[in-house]
Image (cartoon, rainbow, N blue to C red):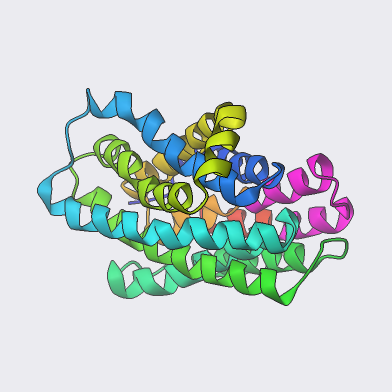
Amino acid sequence: MELTLGVTLAVLGAALAHAAWNALIKSGRDVLLDTALVALGGSVVAAPFVLVVAPPEPASWPWLAASVLIHIGYYGTLAGAYRAGDLSHGYPIMRGSAPLIVALASLAWFGEAPGVAGWAGVALICAGVVSLALGGGAHVSARATLWALANALIIAAYTLADATGVRASGGAVRYVAWMFLFMGLPFGLIVLIAKRRAFVAHAAAHWRRGLAGAALSGASYGVALWAMTRAPVAAVAALRETSVLFGALLGAWLLREGQVRRRLAGAATVLAGVIALKL
């Protein structure tokens, strides 16, 4: 398997979609309720697809179930990071720390060892997102950093689980459609039970936000999983983290978190990593 130009462009589009739904959650009035709304919205968006898409092969179901459980922690730590700090602080740490973890784990998990250029690309991407996270202007707190680091570990865990599951599923579309049907249900129901009145009122006023975020999330992750059936997992995971470029710019311009020049310098480092992955 190799990282072709077509796969590269598809994953970059997925990165933009991922940054957009995170910015949508962060820009709302209640991060926790918006996160739950997007999580449940994923089931609504996926429902029509499972009517026409066959279930994945039985060998993939244990991995799908593991991913659903792992995503409870993912949504929880995501909301925690955005409640404690800025998008331009938490998002780069969450998305930038995960590729190196995945690269190291996939060496043992899949036997996929990146070449010298691949390792250089992973390192450059991680260095770039760290510089984005630590750039001045963002509201930085130890609590937000810890939430973001916890989220990064969870991202690595579900990436490996889903990469294994999709390869055993008989097709990326089959796996993604059924995964999104179940993925957000546990977390969404937990929030609904804990904050029933607030959530119902929030959903009535902002249901379009939930569906939009779910659609962006589904498209983003679906493309990433498809790419993992066509290219090495570590390379796809690292390339997908170019979403930090879009996240940093959305945080600086849309959410007015500032420090555009510093974030562009970090973006240039990440782009250098992407070029190294292509060598």
Instruction: Pick the residue in front: 222 or 182.
Output: 182
When the figure is inspected, residue 210 is found, relative to residue 243, above or below; the finding is: above
Instruction: Pick the residue in front: 39 or 237.
Output: 39
* Residue 201, position as x, y percentages in the image: 58, 35
Instruction: Count up the numbered dots.
Output: 0
Let me know if residue 168 appears in the view.
Answer: yes
Looking at the magenta stretch, what is its main secondary structure? helix
Does 263 sit left or right of 54 as displayed? right
Residue under the point 82% across and 48% down: 252
Q: Residue furthest front?
A: 197
Q: Residue furthest left?
A: 58
Task: Please identify the quarter of the rendering in which residue 121 is found.
Answer: bottom right
* Residue 16, position as x, y percentages in the image: 61, 40
* Residue 162, position as x, y percentages in the image: 32, 54
Does 75 sit left or right of 64 as displayed? right
Residue under the point 59% across and 56% down: 79
The residue segment tinted magenta is 244-269
Residue under the point 86% across and 51% down: 260
* Residue 113, position as x, y percentages in the image: 38, 70
Determine if the magenta segment contains residue 213: no
Let me know if residue 115 appears in the view.
Answer: no
